[in-house]
Image (cartoon, rainbow, N blue to C red):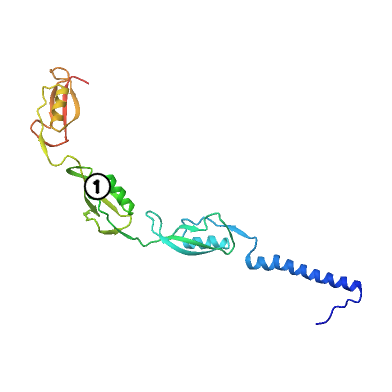
Amino acid sequence: MPKLSTNSKTDLLTHIGIILATALVLFFAFFFIYLPWTTNHGESVQVPDLKGLTLDEVESVLDDNDLKYEVSDSTFVIGQKPLTVFSHYPKPESPVKKGRKIFLTIITDQVPKVSIPNVVGRSVNSAANLLSSVGLQVGQTEFIPAIEKNTVLRLKYDGAEVSTGKSVPKGSKITLVAGDGFGNTTVAVPDLTGMSYDEADILVAGSSLNIGNILYDNASDQPQGTVVRQRPAAGTNLRIGDEVNIWLSGSN
């Protein structure tokens, strides 16, 4: 390696200047050319909101922002479009360096199955909550004659009776069959004609029935408020809790 000539003070200063200039060039080249080129130092972008997008749409959006993606997880969501983004990390509007990989959770098109929990014997509301907790829905609630009011007695799926424990697709609708609280017990309708409204109401209630519609007969010669007609007729068998319509003399 040739030695630098330092025969004079001028030569020495020249050599020192060359060394300092070279060091400065290397410093600026390293921090302002090399590092930005290798690490995108100082350059960042905001993560766009990808929720609800298909993978093709995700790729297009991320390409525009110099970002990448990777599907890291999948989940099933009732009522959401399959094969779209459910969530992602980093979250929307997070600042990241260009070239960063965004991790996606995708809504799967594979519907998982769940077992119908045992809700027989529970109240309608309690059964609905338990079904919802495992990802099932209540379609309809049918009431049948039974003294167990609002208590689930049977279940239906796709119109047919189904037993608890059966596997069905998540999100399926289950029909609850519950008691109406009256059962099949029948009582004979009492004869209410000639009674006042209060008397008729007491007698009907004592028979475990209810007064239904109250109509008026202006043409009757009976005292005001007297029951002049009823439907169903006296002696008709009704279920407990059914209604009896009455006509009162006079006008309302």
Find the residue positioned furthest to the left.
235
Q: Residue at x 87, y 73 (%)?
A: 12
Work out which residue is located at the far bottom of the displayed protein and give it: 1
Q: Position of residue 22 (x, y in %)?
A: 78, 71
Q: Judge whether residue 137 can be spotted in this image.
A: no
What amino acid does circle 1 point to?
A: Arg
Q: Which residue lies at the image location 11% right of the left edge and 38% below the top edge?
A: 186
Looking at the image, can residue 228 be seen? Answer: yes
- Splitting the image into 4 quarters, where does residue 146 fall? top left
On screen, 252 above or below 50? above
Q: Where 205 sits versus 155, above or below?
A: above
Answer few, some or many: residues within 10 Å of disc 1's Cα (few below 14, many 20 plus, some between 14 and 19).
Answer: some
Is the residue 51 above or below the residue 251 in the image? Answer: below
Task: Name the foreground residue: 35 vs 234.
Answer: 35
Q: Is residue 139 left or right of residue 63?
A: left
Q: Which residue is mark 1?
A: 122
